[in-house]
């Protein structure tokens, strides 16, 4: 696998040094469709120089926002076109929500039939406006938003009915109840065994459950800070994905946090006999 993440750097001139120091061989796109062309081309030269690939172009905007939904959908189209132009395999967003409380809010309407129909229509529109051949539009699973299980991923692919709609894998986001947490590695195996052929990018993180609460409290955390058996997890990923599949660490805020997580996963990969 190509293990990587996001290169954190406040100083553009130091970005190349940070990439080298990280050891990453896959990264999130460090630019968008709105980045000046010369800056994008400079970063692309650095990325190629160091045998790194861009695993995904992110959208991260809500196409159902009451005020900005249309502009956000247009942005998704432009980001998908960017991914297509650069042959990046994955352009990823979340489904979005009609909630007034945030672009990624938990809301009862997220699972309504009407929202599902709007979601299918929006995905079709984004893909049809670009008509990509090399990249795939994908939705990152969320604990409180579609898709939230392998079954829903497969059903959504059938209903969208577009060849260039595929799967973004974030199994920790789908570990959203005690049953899945307590058999996490079994659930992760189910995710990859059923969705493996359609996965274009994977996020890697850990999960822990607060044992002091009478109600369920699940936390996302960095690898090694939760309960997942990373030797088993990495063997599962290696079994179902190509040897050069991108696997990205995420949601760390500093270079040091990414480096610590990378070192932990690399050590577990060596223990598991998995090449990175």
Image (cartoon, grey):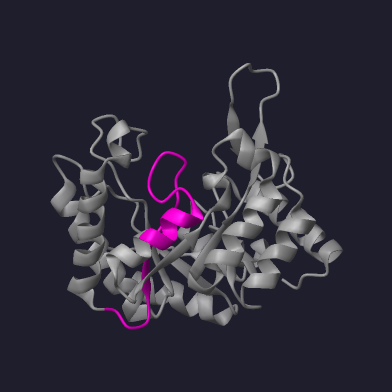
**Magenta part of the chain:** 132-155
Residue 134 rendering spot, x and y as whole percentages? 37, 82
Q: Is 171 in front, or is 193?
A: 193
Q: What residue is drawn where x is 53% and y is 46%?
A: 174
Q: What residue is drawn where x is 67% and y is 35%?
A: 208
Tell me if residue 39 comes above or below residue 259 in the rendering: below
Residue 217 rendering spot, x and y as whole percentages? 58, 26
Residue 243 shown in magenta: no
User: Could you tell whether 22 is left or right of 169 in the image?
Assistant: right
Q: Is 228 in front, or is 249?
A: 228
Q: Which quarter of the picture shows residue 165?
A: bottom left
Q: Can you say which quadrant of the picture contains the N terminus?
A: bottom right
Tell me if residue 66 comes above or below residue 151 in the rendering: above
User: Could you tell whether 258 is left or right of 37 in the image?
Assistant: right
Q: What residue is drawn where x is 27% and y is 73%?
A: 81
Residue 66 rendering spot, x and y as whole percentages? 15, 39
């Amino acid at each position: 696998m190509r293990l990587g993440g996001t290169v954190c750097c406040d100083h553009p001139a130091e970005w190349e040094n940070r990439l080298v120091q990280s050891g990453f061989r896959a990264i999130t796109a460090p630019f968008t469709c709105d980045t000046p062309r010369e800056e994008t081309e400079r970063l692309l030269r650095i990325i190629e120089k160091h045998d790194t690939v861009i695993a995904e172009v992110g959208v991260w905007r809500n196409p159902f926002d009451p005020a900005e939904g249309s502009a956000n959908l247009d942005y998704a189209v432009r980001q998908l076109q960017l991914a297509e132009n650069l042959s990046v395999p994955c352009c990823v967003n979340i489904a979005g929500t009609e909630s007034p409380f945030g672009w990624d809010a938990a809301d009862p309407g997220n699972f309504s039939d009407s929202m599902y129909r709007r979601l299918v229509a929006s995905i079709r529109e984004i893909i049809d406006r670009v008509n990509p051949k090399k990249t795939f539009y994908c939705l990152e699973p969320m604990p409180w938003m579609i898709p939230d299980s392998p079954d829903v991923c497969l059903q959504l692919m059938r209903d969208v009915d577009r060849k260039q709609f595929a799967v973004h894998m974030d199994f920790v986001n789908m570990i959203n109840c005690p049953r899945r947490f307590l058999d996490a590695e079994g659930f992760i195996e189910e995710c990859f065994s059923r969705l493996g052929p359609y996965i274009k990018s994977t996020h890697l993180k850990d999960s822990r459950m607060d044992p002091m609460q009478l109600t369920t409290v699940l936390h996302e955390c960095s690898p090694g800070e939760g309960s997942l058996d990373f030797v088993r997890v990495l063997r599962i990923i290696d079994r179902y994905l190509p040897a050069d599949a991108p696997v990205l660490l995420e949601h760390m805020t500093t270079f040091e946090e990414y480096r610590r997580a990378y070192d932990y996963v690399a050590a577990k990969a060596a223990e598991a006999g998995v090449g990175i």
